[in-house]
């Protein structure tokens, strides 16, 4: 302790706080044998603090605010610059971080596992199971009213200018005939309402309340009435499975949980958005596959071929130009895979079948927006 | 400014230091450079650990800020631990995951089944969060006070989170229902509730004064806003286009914005000047409005420049690492590496975005929180501090949840604090 010997005669004033009240006690501080000695002004000692346990609770510069160890309530402030410098020199551990008790790590791991498991259970089991049951409890009238509202908002989203639905005429009758034939055996929980939106995109949607929207672009792209019927059957599959309300409930049930798990630090925002998009598209892809399966079954019961629908998917793929860029994020599965799955279930093959629409009706339907 | 009276005396043990004459200033002597280094390092760790490191970041930053504030020679101490925050957060996740999921499902179902899925119906799930948010905020404040000491004596906040939650719901409900007119009352009543439950040792804080001055300050914001809103509604009802006087609208909006900041600064001053500790110790707070505006403007400039520079540098680095981008993109376009496209785009985004986020956060501490804290402390005077020395130690308040609910809900009390 040569360093200590050098400070043998050093004495300085300090202020001592006993940890029981905030009242200061003026003291004299000097070095002892590997310790700091605190004395009252009349030289009666108050405390011997081991130098190795000393910690500085101040900001590191200027005056010292010492505590004898991490757990103590006692404090000593020293603003005498010589004494402060001496203590800094002989106690290298002044700024050491408070130590953490060991068993706490075990608790953290345990609760971490519990948090992951509970979020996983909720996202993949609880929320889907509950929302499937709740969706069936929504009164059909409420669903229909909601669907009607959404049709307008939805159409406005896709149409440039005021949205227009193509209705009536020979095209309207052809659409009604196609819908009626598919609806017979579909077993939907409410009557279907199929409409054609005057928009060029190749797209179709099922909304709550049995509302189905086919886009003009889709009818123009389909090469046969059976291809269009296949798409319609797919959308009917969504209606029968109550997908529009079921999926809304599912994402509500798991909304915010990923954000909860990752916390709200700034960099997490993107991660959270990405994970939630993945989750939603996961739910969605599951629903799409189910709707495809439903469509092939419905086509088979009506004695219609599924091959035209498969052909339609392949054509979509060609027009999109190769595999989708953000394939994992897109809500619909890869068209080639869908085409293969749907084509495999074709029960008609090259055999003759009763077309869903006459050539005349098909032309009328394709031109419904003219 | 870190020396107090003792250090100006000759350093002989025999000269008993004099008590500082009242009032006592609050000294903030934190170093901006150290703070920036701390914040940048901890934020980088936080990003690399997918957010888990934030508990260590908050703890370290709080220790820095607390230790930089000295009152009569003694610094504030922050004794919170990162691991207790992590555990509290995990506990909160387990409970909140179940609560949020069920509440969101139930409210969404109600919205779909009875409100026909209209806009208000779909916002219902947010309501499930509100009481939990207020509750969590109070608990977070209780944790922070329970881990704050001065001269070794603990601060504390008495239990009362549910009482706070329902009062907050009621007062915020009143503020919303009155189109914002009653906001000062909300501010005042909630501050009074929290202050009356705050302690230093066994001495209790109290909030004196009424909401009157707050209301007068608020009217400078509310009246122009209400006037503007009423005029807009009038034109909308008549279906007319606004006349030439509409050109004044941006001026009025600027006036409202300035008024709002002014009101926030005024409330800070007003509410804190009327707090008392143990019935004797008082505070006077002088924080200038233009000072605050200056800090925000210059801080925003520095942060904007810093983040832009970081993004530029990391873009250059990313570009250099990729080599010839044209070759890469043509390989992708030819479908030679189709599965990589999405991942690569994400990696590029992360390489540019994440350093910018870290710098953003660190600059925020160094150029907003630091100067604001400095200005606020410089304006605070404590009268009759000696009376506070009567304070007796209070028992340790375990608060095992350690602000975890507030952290999970994103309702933390202002970033570092």
Image: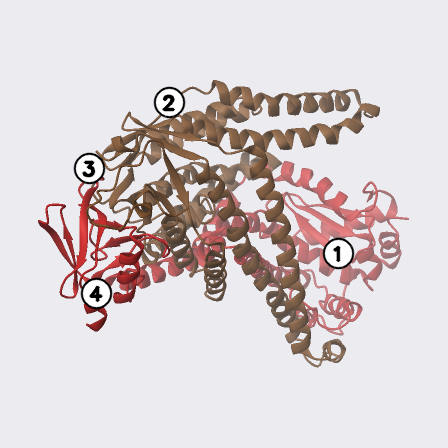
Chain colours: A red, B brown
Secondary structure beneath disc 3?
A: loop
Q: Please determine if labels 3 and 1 lie on a single subunit.
A: no
Specify whether residue A99 is in view. Answer: no
Please tell me which residue is depicted at 54% across the width and 58% down the height of the picture: A267
- Graded by Cα atoms within 10 Å as few (under 14), some (14 to 19) or many (20 or more), the crowding at tag 2 reads some
Tell me which corner region of the image, top left, top right, bottom left or bottom right, holds residue B297.
top right
For discs 3 and 1, the disc positioned in front in the rendered view? 3
Frontmost residue, A224 versus A207: A207
Frontmost residue, B297 versus B57: B297
Real-space CA distance between mark 4 and mark 1, rounded to the nearest whole angstrom? 75 Å
Secondary structure beneath disc 4?
A: helix
Seen in the picture, residue B188 relative to A246 is either above or below; the reply is: above
Q: Please determine if labels 3 and 2 lie on a single subunit.
A: yes
Real-space CA distance between mark 3 and mark 4, rounded to the nearest whole angstrom? 29 Å
Q: Please determine if labels 3 and 4 lie on a single subunit.
A: no
Which mark, by number, is residue A203?
Answer: 1
Real-space CA distance between mark 4 and mark 2, rounded to the nearest whole angstrom? 47 Å
Mark 2 = which residue? B208
Mark 4 = which residue? A52
Q: Please determine if labels 2 and 1 lie on a single subunit.
A: no
Pointers 2 and 1 in contact (CB under 8 A)? Answer: no
For discs 3 and 4, the disc positioned in front in the rendered view? 4
């Amino acid at each position: 302790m040569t360093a200590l010997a050098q400070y043998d005669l050093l004495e300085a004033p300090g202020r001592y706080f006993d940890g029981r009240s905030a009242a200061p006690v003026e003291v004299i501080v000097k070095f002892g044998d590997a310790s700091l000695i605190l004395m009252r002004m009349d030289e009666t000692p108050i405390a011997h603090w081991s130098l190795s346990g000393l910690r500085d609770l101040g900001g590191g510069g200027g005056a010292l605010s010492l505590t004898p160890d991490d757990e103590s309530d006692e404090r000593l402030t020293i603003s005498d610059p010589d004494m402060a410098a001496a203590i800094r020199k002989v106690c290298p551990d002044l700024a050491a971080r408070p130590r953490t008790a060991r068993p706490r790590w075990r608790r953290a791991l345990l609760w971490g596992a519990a948090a992951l498991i509970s979020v996983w259970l909720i996202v993949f089991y609880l929320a889907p199971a509950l929302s499937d049951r709740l969706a069936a409890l929504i009164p059909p009238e409420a669903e229909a009213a909601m669907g009607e509202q959404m049709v307008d908002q939805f159409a406005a989203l896709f149409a440039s200018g005021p949205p227009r639905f193509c209705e009536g005429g020979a095209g309207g009758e052809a659409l009604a005939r196609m819908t009626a034939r598919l609806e017979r055996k579909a077993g939907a929980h409410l009557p279907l309402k199929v409409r054609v939106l005057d928009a060029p995109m190749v797209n179709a949607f099922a909304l709550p309340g049995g509302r189905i929207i086919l886009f003009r672009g889709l009818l123009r792209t389909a090469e046969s009435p059976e291809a269009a019927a296949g798409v319609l059957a797919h959308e009917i599959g969504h209606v029968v499975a109550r997908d529009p309300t079921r999926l809304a409930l599912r994402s509500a049930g798991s909304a915010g949980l990923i954000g909860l798990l990752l916390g709200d630090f700034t960099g997490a925002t993107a991660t959270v958005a990405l994970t939630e998009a993945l989750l939603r598209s996961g739910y969605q892809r599951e629903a799409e596959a189910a709707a495809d399966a439903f469509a092939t079954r419905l086509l088979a019961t009506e004695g219609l071929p599924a091959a035209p629908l498969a052909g339609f998917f392949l054509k979509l793929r060609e027009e999109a130009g190769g595999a989708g860029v953000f394939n994992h994020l897109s809500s619909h599965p890869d068209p080639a895979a869908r085409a293969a799955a749907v084509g495999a279930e074709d029960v008609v093959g090259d055999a003759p079948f009763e077309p869903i629409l006459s050539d005349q009706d098909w032309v009328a339907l394709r031109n419904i927006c003219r | 400014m870190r020396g107090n009276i003792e250090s100006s005396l000759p350093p002989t043990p025999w000269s008993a230091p004099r008590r500082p004459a009242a009032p006592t200033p609050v000294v903030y002597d934190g170093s901006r450079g150290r703070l920036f280094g701390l914040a940048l390092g901890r934020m980088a760790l936080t990003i690399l650990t997918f957010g888990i490191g934030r508990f260590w970041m908050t703890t370290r930053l709080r220790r820095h800020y607390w230790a930089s504030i000295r009152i009569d020679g003694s610094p504030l101490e922050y004794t919170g631990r990162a691991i207790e925050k992590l555990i509290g957060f995990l506990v909160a996740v387990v409970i909140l995951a179940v609560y949020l999921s069920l509440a969101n499902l139930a409210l969404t179902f109600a919205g779909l089944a009875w409100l026909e899925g209209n806009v208000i119906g779909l916002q219902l799930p947010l309501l499930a969060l509100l009481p939990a948010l207020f509750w969590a905020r109070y608990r977070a404040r209780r944790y922070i006070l329970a881990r704050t000491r001065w001269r070794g004596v603990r601060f504390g906040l008495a239990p009362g989170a549910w009482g706070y939650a329902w009062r907050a719901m009621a007062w915020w409900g009143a503020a919303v229902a009155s189109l914002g007119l009653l906001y000062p009352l909300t501010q005042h009543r909630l501050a009074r509730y929290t202050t009356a439950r705050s302690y230093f040792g066994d001495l209790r804080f109290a909030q004196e004064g009424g909401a009157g001055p707050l209301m007068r300050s608020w009217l400078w914001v509310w009246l122009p806003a209400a006037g503007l809103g009423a005029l807009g509604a009038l034109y909308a009802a008549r279906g007319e286009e606004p006349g030439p006087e509409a050109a004044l609208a941006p001026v009025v909006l600027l006036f409202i914005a300035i008024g709002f900041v002014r009101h926030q600064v005024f409330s800070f001053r007003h509410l804190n000047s009327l707090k008392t500790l143990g019935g004797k110790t008082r505070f006077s707070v002088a924080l200038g409005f233009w000072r605050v505006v200056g800090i925000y403007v210059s801080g925003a400039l520095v942060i904007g420049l810093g983040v832009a520079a970081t993004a530029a540098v990391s873009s250059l680095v990313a570009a250099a690492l990729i080599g010839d981008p044209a070759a890469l993109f043509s390989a992708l376009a030819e479908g030679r590496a189709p599965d990589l496209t999405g991942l690569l785009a994400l990696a590029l985004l992360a390489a540019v975005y994440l350093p910018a986020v870290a710098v953003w956060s660190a600059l925020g501490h160094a150029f907003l929180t630091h100067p604001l804290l400095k200005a606020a402390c410089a304006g605070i005077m404590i009268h009759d501090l000696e009376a506070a020395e009567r304070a007796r130690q209070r028992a340790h308040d375990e608060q095992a949840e350690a602000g975890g609910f507030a952290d999970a809900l994103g309702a933390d009390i202002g970033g570092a604090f």
